[in-house]
């Protein structure tokens, strides 16, 4: 006896436009896909009425947990200041750090919930959320605890990443902060089981390759996964270093070169594209999509939802931007928010509608999934299911 049968569905188990299944139905048991194609007795039945059924979307790179906004930086940028100049003057990430340090878990959750629910309404069923606006022991842990609380309160799944190495806090030197992250913060986060991976911002205005190497070694010792922000504003060869240390994913990559592409390909590292940040910062340098494609590097697409560079609480918008601005095919863009995003997070239990995976899916009244890379706005799933249950 299954829990649910979904039938009369145009089923896209891999989400790519070219990979529609012959099967028209699937069965759910205990939150997982039990069979595809066959039917049988079930406690409930969902007639998809010939709608498109896609795997639940996965937003694999966000800084969704924050309070306040940075609207004033928009004006500063309009007047000619760059993101780096604003950051060096004590604005940027550090202005959000001041707000987050003063906020309680409840205030952090209340500010973040509407953003996560906005993603869920578009069919997003898993969201990665980073810390990185605390930059001290109690504030980083409070951020991760807030993510854990939201995970328990919301119907979608959240996956927390410790981004302690996001910026250097004003009260410390870079070297002593890196020591503190390695010696105190990461062990404390690991001991509490609050994050399954680390991330680091490797850029001239943040951390360098030597800092990154030390943090990667510490993460590996603790058995934490590795993600990194690389080559966003300049070529630092950070992707090569991260890949060599077994990074699952590296993000941004506008300045990535051929050597970096080879390193990602060799290590099976996912390239996470963040067109929302590219768009909001008015960037012109495109990530090397043709090279990534030729080297068969899996590409994911995420919102980078954050108050500074990508106040974009819409994965559908980013999917559209990945296709329109970066030139991804519809299939690449859709794989980028499903299977490849799951792989980036090491969550191989989702991202496809195949037997054994989580029954996270959405129903769409569309002629075909590629419509999501064509029409901007006005599209929403008619239903979203997480582990076989309606949102
Ligand atoms: N890269 C980004 O896009 C965000 N963090 C990072 O390292 C920006 C975060 C912010 O400006 O608040
Ligand atoms: Fe980011």
Image (cartoon, rainbow, N blue to C red):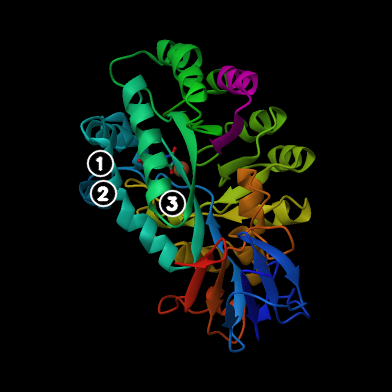
Residue 359, x across and y down, in percent:
61, 63
Q: Quadrant of residue 22?
A: bottom right
State the extent of the magenta-drawn residues as a range.
213-229
Residue highlighted by disc 1: 106
Q: Does the magenta-highlighted stretch encompass residue 125?
A: no
Q: Residue at x 49, y 70 (%)?
A: 384
Q: Residue at x 63, y 71 (%)?
A: 330
Q: Looking at the image, is mark 1 or mark 3 earlier in the sequence?
A: 1
Residue 200, x across and y down, in percent:
50, 31
Label 3 near ligand 1 (CB < 8 Å)? yes
Left or right for 15, reference 171: right
* Residue 80 appears in the rendering: no
Residue highlighted by disc 2: 110
Looking at the rendered structure, the number of numbered marks drawn on it comes to 3
User: Between 387 and 122, which is closer to the camera in this rendering?
Assistant: 387
Q: Secondary structure at mark 2?
A: helix
User: Between 350 and 46, which is closer to the camera in this rendering?
Assistant: 46
Q: Are marks 1 and 3 in contact (CB under 8 Å)?
A: no
* Residue 351 appears in the rendering: yes
Rendered view: 173 above or below 309: above
Q: Are marks 1 and 2 in contact (CB under 8 Å)?
A: yes
Residues under labels 1 and 2: Cα distance? 6 Å
Label 1 near ligand 1 (CB < 8 Å)? no
Left or right for 110, reference 326: left
Q: Residue at x 56, y 23 (%)?
A: 212
Residues under labels 2 and 3: Cα distance? 24 Å
Q: Does the magenta-highlighted stretch encompass residue 217?
A: yes
Rendered view: 132 above or below 125: above
């Amino acid at each position: 006896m299954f829990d649910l049968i979904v039938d009369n569905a145009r089923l896209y188990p891999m989400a790519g436009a070219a990979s529609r299944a012959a099967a028209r139905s699937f069965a759910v048991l205990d939150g997982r896909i039990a069979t595809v194609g066959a039917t049988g007795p079930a406690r409930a039945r969902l007639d998809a009425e010939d709608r498109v059924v896609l795997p639940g979307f996965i937003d694999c790179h966000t800084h969704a947990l924050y309070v306040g906004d940075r609207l004033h930086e928009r004006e500063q940028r309009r007047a000619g200041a760059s993101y780096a100049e604003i950051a060096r003057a004590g604005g940027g990430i550090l202005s959000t750090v001041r707000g987050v340090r003063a906020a309680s878990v409840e205030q952090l959750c209340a500010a973040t919930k509407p953003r996560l629910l906005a993603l869920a309404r578009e069919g997003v069923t898993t969201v990665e959320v980073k810390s990185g606006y605390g930059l001290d022991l109690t504030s980083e842990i409070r951020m991760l605890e807030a993510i854990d609380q939201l995970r328990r309160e919301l119907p979608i799944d959240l996956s927390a990443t410790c981004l302690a190495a996001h910026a250097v806090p004003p009260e410390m030197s870079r070297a002593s902060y890196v020591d503190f992250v390695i010696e105190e913060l990461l062990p404390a986060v690991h001991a509490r089981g609050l994050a399954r991976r680390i991330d680091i911002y490797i850029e001239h205005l943040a951390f360098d390759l030597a800092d990154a190497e030390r943090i990667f070694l510490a993460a590996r010792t603790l058995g934490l996964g590795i993600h990194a922000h690389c080559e966003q504003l300049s070529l630092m060869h950070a992707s090569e270093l991260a890949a060599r240390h077994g990074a699952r994913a590296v993000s941004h990559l506008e300045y990535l070169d051929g050597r970096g592409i080879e390193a990602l390909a060799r290590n099976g590292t996912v390239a996470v594209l963040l067109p929302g940040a590219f768009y909001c910062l008015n960037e012109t340098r495109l990530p090397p999509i043709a090279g990534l494609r030729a080297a068969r590097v899996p590409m994911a697409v995420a919102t980078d939802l954050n108050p500074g560079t990508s106040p974009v609480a819409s994965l559908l918008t980013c999917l559209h931007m990945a296709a329109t601005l970066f030139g991804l095919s519809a299939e690449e863009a859709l794989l980028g928010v499903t299977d490849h995003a799951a792989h980036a997070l090491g969550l191989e239990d989702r991202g496809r509608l195949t037997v054994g995976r989580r029954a996270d899916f959405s129903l769409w009244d569309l002629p075909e999934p590629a419509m999501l890379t064509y029409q901007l706005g006005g599209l929403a799933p008619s239903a979203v299911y997480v582990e076989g249950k309606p949102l």
